[in-house]
Image: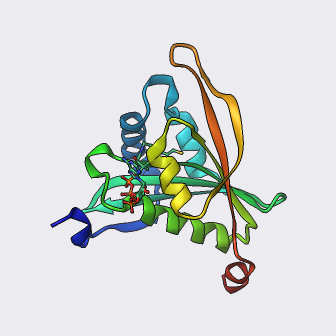
Amino acid sequence: MSHRSFFEVAAISRAEPRDLDAICEIEHRCFLGPTAYSEDVLRGLLLSDNADCLVLRHRGKIAAFAILVCSSEALRADIETIDVDPAFRGRGFARQLLVAVEQCAELRKMREIELEVACSNSAAFRLYQSAGFTVRARLVRYYRFLHHGTHDAYRMIKVLSPDARCRS
Ligand SMILES: CC(C)(COP(=O)(O)OP(=O)(O)OC[C@H]1O[C@@H](n2cnc3c(N)ncnc32)[C@H](O)[C@@H]1OP(=O)(O)O)[C@@H](O)C(=O)NCCC(=O)NCCS
């Protein structure tokens, strides 16, 4: 039986300041050294009025999180990241968070969602592609790290349906 046959009990909620430590730990399990967001950056996003930071709990433990930043001028939301703890991957948690993130963007009446993903990150690329995001541009040497080299990224977008924006 595939793991997809099991109902994975997961609860998504808004992150609280007390969730910061768990979020930082997952970020550092997902991204090495300077490629990870710092605690200060994550705290700033967690506390920002323009951002939605969601945590997904599995059996009471934070297993994943996602951060969306919205621009009310551009009516565009940016997915900063979706991070799933390596121990909890392949259970549909990222897909559940992505649905929740889209609902947040609709509630804020955004027109589209944008994100950047490293061209080498095939898991994340497929996640976004399968959820209806399309490549708008390839950004050459978008990520630049002193000891981790440079990496191209895809900028991907998804235009939100006007119906969904009206409903919310
Ligand atoms: C990318 C990531 C978020 C996926 O999390 P996940 O919970 O394992 O993903 P899900 O189980 O929800 O899978 C959803 C879809 O993503 C894609 N996907 C996930 N893992 C994949 C893999 N190893 N290879 C290829 N595609 C993959 C598939 O399209 C999958 O759908 P399917 O199972 O129907 O084929 C996770 O690997 C991760 O946290 N990576 C490190 C952080 C990161 O790179 N975040 C994205 C920053 S832009």
Q: Quadrant of residue 144?
A: top right
Check the image and report above or below for 67 versus 161.
above
Residue at horizontal 62 percent and vertical 31 percent from the top: 152
Residue 90: x %, y % from top left = 31, 55
Check the image and report above or below for 13 versus 164.
above
Residue at horizontal 51 percent and vertical 35 percent from the top: 120
Residue at horizontal 43 percent and vertical 66 percent from the top: 96
Q: Is residue 94 visible?
A: yes
Name the quarter where the N terminus is drawn. bottom left
Q: Quadrant of residue 4?
A: bottom left
Instruction: Pick out the residue farthest to the top.
Output: 147
Residue 43: x %, y % from top left = 54, 42
Foreground pick, 119 / 101: 119
Foreground pick, 13 / 10: 10
Residue 71: x %, y % from top left = 76, 56
Instruction: Pick out the residue farthest to the bottom.
Output: 167
Check the image and report above or below for 49 versus 34.
below
Question: Relative to residue 87, is residue 1 drawn left or right?
Answer: left
Instruction: Pick out the residue farthest to the right.
Output: 73
Instruction: Pick out the residue farthest to the left.
Output: 1
So how many labels did they put on this image?
0
Residue at horizontal 75 percent and vertical 78 percent from the top: 162
Residue 98: x %, y % from top left = 51, 62
Name the quarter where the C terminus is drawn. bottom right
Q: Is residue 82 visible?
A: no
Name the image colouring.
rainbow
Check the image and report above or below for 8 versus 54.
below
Foreground pick, 133 / 30: 133
